[in-house]
Amino acid sequence: MSAGVVTPTATTALKDFLNAPASYPRGPQTVKMLRIGKVRDGSKVGVFIYCQEHAREWGTPLVCLETAERLLRNYGVDPETTKLVDNLDIFIIPTINADGAAYSMYDNSAQRKNMVNYCASNPTGNNDPAARNSWGVDLNRNFSVGSLFDGYTGASSSCTSDVFSGPSEFSEPETRNEKYVQDTFTNIKFAMNIHSSGGYFMWPPGAYKGADRVPLAYPPYGTLKYFDQTAASVLDRIKSYRGTTILPTQTGPVNDVLYSAAGNSADEAYYNHGIIGYDFEIGADRFTGTGTAQTEVGFTPPYAPEGHDEGMEFAHGNYALLGSALDYARDTKAPTVTAVGPDISPSSFDVTFSQDEAAEIHYTTDGSAPTMSSPLYGPSHARGRPEPVRIVGTTTLRWIARDFKGNTSTGSRLFQVGGNGGVGGDVPGTLSLSLGPAPSFGAFTPGVDRDYTAGTTATVTSTAGDALLSVADPDTAHPGHLVNGQFALPSPLQMRGRKSDAQGTAFNNVNSLLNLLTWNGPVSNDHVDLDYKQHIGANDGLRTGTYAKTLTFTLSTTTP
Ligand SMILES: [Zn+2]
């Protein structure tokens, strides 16, 4: 041996420090998608279900795989499954983040992001391979709607952050895979992005920006209702498996129930593709004892029994989503909408709408035909109740309603302010000419031609620019005539009004509608005499008893 000469040694394979068995592929993995449906030519409504964007959420691929397995194994056996497969085009990706998933299961169970290294040129020291557990891009922050690059909250530009957005929108092949699916299969109308954990069921908007938390535009109210309606069927189905409930406070737009997630996948689906895109956080806290406390189940519960049960219950939920997609495909029925409120009320009042399905309702109060550009029946703020329609005078409320499929219906209803008791006064709503027992009137005398008169008063207060007092007889059998059971007086009931200034109309027949008095400005406590006249002819047959009529007085305005 001579000094200064290095002795050759056998070559040593460099270790990659990965714990997966040698048989497990080391390179970038191919992400696989299943397409399930009897007719797969794009003519059927498409549903996109995808899992495990976040590597450590181990329960999620079970949900996707269980859903796929049921659809294939039970086809032709289970009628529901057969119907879904025959009529839908179902796309399922069990693992979006395949590299991260392998790393999470074999090496670092807390791995959330994908396996790319954007810290290589980072000067802060996180470029050392020992820091590799902090590398990677949060795939659910790498999309293009409401992204960090657009100024939205809930993602980071730090290469080691758990919510690292990546260097640009769609920088990652995993997110471009999702974009490819949605760009290519334009029949996809519903999507479910399955995450874990905590039990949240959410939809757009999922990002806001600035100190004022300005959100992405909320979907139209009718569409939000549709998200809600479909969600309800999914939640019911999940609960049916083992009683797991998703709390109402954890159901709704991401912004409202969780946080801002800049550049997330569901916002991409909805805002860029018009897809009813949901986010689900499976692994809901569970009521396992007898009290009200819930038990957390975490990202990576053991397969038996928790992981298995989560796969089963949320596959149940996916079946409900598929059922809703099928309902959508077959929906040719227009929404049934009714206006809810009294026909008439002494003072202004509120009217709401009831509907048998999610629908966008627009209305007018000026009698014109409503369009989808007319005022919207909806809340004034996120998660609010719809603002009612205020009725301030005689109003024909007309509406048009459109369901999410596009089926439309129209309707109208007349509302009035006034009537029994009048406005701010005491207009008698029930006019009873006390024929017979009423001593002030005396009795109608059969066989004697004579005019009988009676009177009452009213007090009118109006803050409107003008006002009209009218009287109507809603009776359709004998409008404008006093009746006693099946008998009506032959001569019409007449009325006139006299204001405090002694001005007013002459006697006219009370019919289906008679205008009595008008005011050209606001008035307070104006005294009104309401005079009634009834003619009895010499040959009129009179039936024993009380002749009466219930009349409707209306104070209305064209300038409320
Ligand atoms: Zn997640």
Image (cartoon, rainbow, N blue to C red):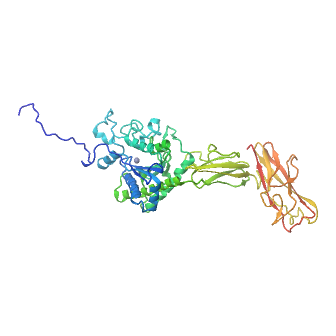
What residue lies at 72% left-to-right and 54% top-to-bottom? 344
* Numbered marks: total: 0
What residue lies at 87% left-to-right and 45% top-to-bottom? 501
Question: Nearest the camera: 308 or 346?
Answer: 308
What residue lies at 25% left-to-right and 49% top-to-bottom? 21
Q: Quadrant of the C terminus?
A: top right
For residue 482, what is the image quadrant?
bottom right
Can the viewer see residue 265 in this picture?
yes
> In the rendered view, does 248 fall on the left or right side of 108?
right
> In the rendered view, does 507 fall on the left or right side of 374?
right
Q: Residue furthest bottom?
A: 544
Q: Position of residue 7 (x, y in %)?
A: 10, 35
Q: Position of residue 314 (x, y in %)?
A: 43, 56
Q: Position of residue 489 (x, y in %)?
A: 86, 62
Residue 119 sits above or below residue 193 on the image:
above
Q: Quadrant of the N terminus?
A: top left
Q: Residue furthest top?
A: 4
For residue 177, what is the image quadrant?
top left
Q: Position of residue 117 (x, y in %)?
A: 33, 38
> In the rendered view, does 545 fall on the left or right side of 39?
right
Can the viewer see residue 292 in this picture?
no
